[in-house]
Image (cartoon, rainbow, N blue to C red):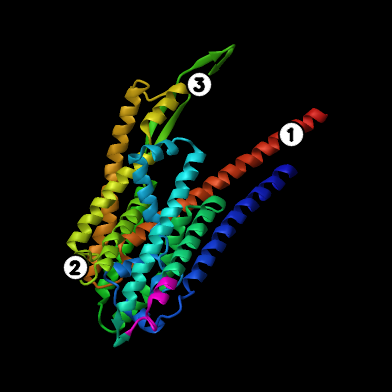
Amino acid sequence: MGQRISALPESMNHLQKKILFTLGFLALYRIGVHVPIPGVDAARLSEFFQSQGANAFGMINMFSGGALERFSIFALGVMPYISASIIAQLLTVVVPHLEALSKEGDAGRKKITQYTRYGTILLALIQGFMIGRTLSGAEFGGGSLVLNPGMGWLTFTAISLTAGTALVMWIGEQITERGVGNGISLIIFAGIVAGLPSVITNTYSKYNSAEMEIIQILLLIVIVVVITAGVVFIEQGARQVPIQYAKRQVGKRVYGGQTSHLPIRVNTAGVIPPIFASSLLQIPVTAAQVMEGSDTANVINTLFIPGGWAYNLVYLSLIVFFAFFYTSIQFKPDDIAENLKKHGGFIPGIRPGAKTSDFLAKVISRLTLTGAIYLAAICLVPSIITERFNVQFYFGGTSLLIIVGVALETFRQIDAHRQSLRYEAFMKQGSSRSSGRGRS
């Protein structure tokens, strides 16, 4: 009994270290958000981004946790890494060499991850140069945002932002490998949560200045509560596909015959589709910066405003696409059907092999369509409503979906760690008893 009591706290201590490791690296990220790049008028830049709350710059600032508003070394956040990951996953389907690497196990995945890192550095360098160039030529409040614009400052800024993105990428990977939860998702989560107090304060200030009425604030609260409840309800939803294992006799013993279930979640892709879609929508903004002053740039800046019809249409299409694309990567009916057949499992009423694969593909397609519609509704409808009240994006569906979805997934992983640690403690207890009987 004493061995059992001592084994469990030792295992729980391991989980506590993982949680503390995660919190420590998130704190490191938040410290980096407050380290500014020199040469910028900080007060004027802050006022500039506060006036950009209803366009793409405001959304980038939200996902970076206010780093862009402060123009810190983490101003680009994880967006270049997400964009590079999207490109790598798309190329894996198209390029035979990358497809072959993806099937080589850990070695192949490590090679693709290395290519993704290279792509992240390249994209961060390009985006850093474009943002620096935009700020160099921008004026606000009767003065320039950059104190001493020039090629030297522009080069220094691009390199600093690239280095910051590389550090954020490393922090995210460390959290994923040695902490709990998905590191990149937790970094976005931390950035959004860090901005909530200021948004609540701004909303209260608007109420005091009669810019918002009490009925509008109450409606916003209802929207937040409904979205949160809806996300929790859908994220916990899953279809339980029954699995029956055939009986087989080995000697005098009979194995198998058990009945279990294969859970297939309604939203298998999680918060990845809206994050990927938001990241890809920054490409037109970057293109507009390159073609600044041209008619094409003016059209892009006019159309791709969050809340506009063109932005919402593209955003909706990207969410649906990435919901199906990411699910197809994570859930492979052929592999599952083959594994079931090897272990003597089958779905009642469905023949093993190709028929099982077709059945699972049909089920996952229907669930993915439901999940994609749910994601689109959660991300678009509240954002459209809140835009009518002229409030910032933190009350939009995308941010709430990320907050609730990442929190649920993180707690799910913590619970899985706890269950595995309890199992390990139980196995140690059993082995200790066996060795004790052997000595006696």
Compared with 412, 253 (above or below) is above
Residue 431 shows up from this direction? yes
What element does badge 2 sit on?
helix
Q: Which residue is mark 1?
A: 433
Residue positioned 42% across, 60% down in the render: 78
- Tell me the CA gap for discs 1 and 2: 72 Å
> Which residue, as the protein is rendered here, is positioned at the far top?
251
Please name the residue shown 26% across and 49% down the image.
373
Residue 74 visible: no
Image quarter of the N terminus: top right
Seen in the image, is 168 located left or right of residue 364?
right
Start and end of the magenta stretch? 144-157
Residue nearer the viewer, 188 or 375: 188
Q: Is residue 145 magenta?
A: yes
Closer mark to the observer between disc 1 and disc 2: 2
Question: Camera-side residue: 88 or 47?
Answer: 88
Q: Position of residue 108 (x, y in %)?
A: 48, 40
Task: State the residue at coordinates (45%, 30%).
Answer: 260
* Amino acid bearing label 1: Arg
Q: Nearer the viewer, residue 259 or 275?
A: 275
Quadrant in the rendering for residue 102: top left
Measured along the vertical axis of the image, is residue 85 above or below residue 303?
A: above
Per the image, the residue denoted by label 2 is 302
Distance between the alpha carbons at the discs numbered 2 and 3: 63 Å
Q: Secondary structure at mark 1?
A: helix
Q: Earlier in the sequence, mark 3 or mark 1?
A: 3
Q: Is residue 329 magenta?
A: no
Q: Farthest residue in the front direction?
A: 151
Q: Quadrant of residue 184?
A: bottom left
Which amino acid, mark 3? Answer: Gly
Residue 33 location (% of width, % of height): 47, 70
Q: Secondary structure at mark 3?
A: loop
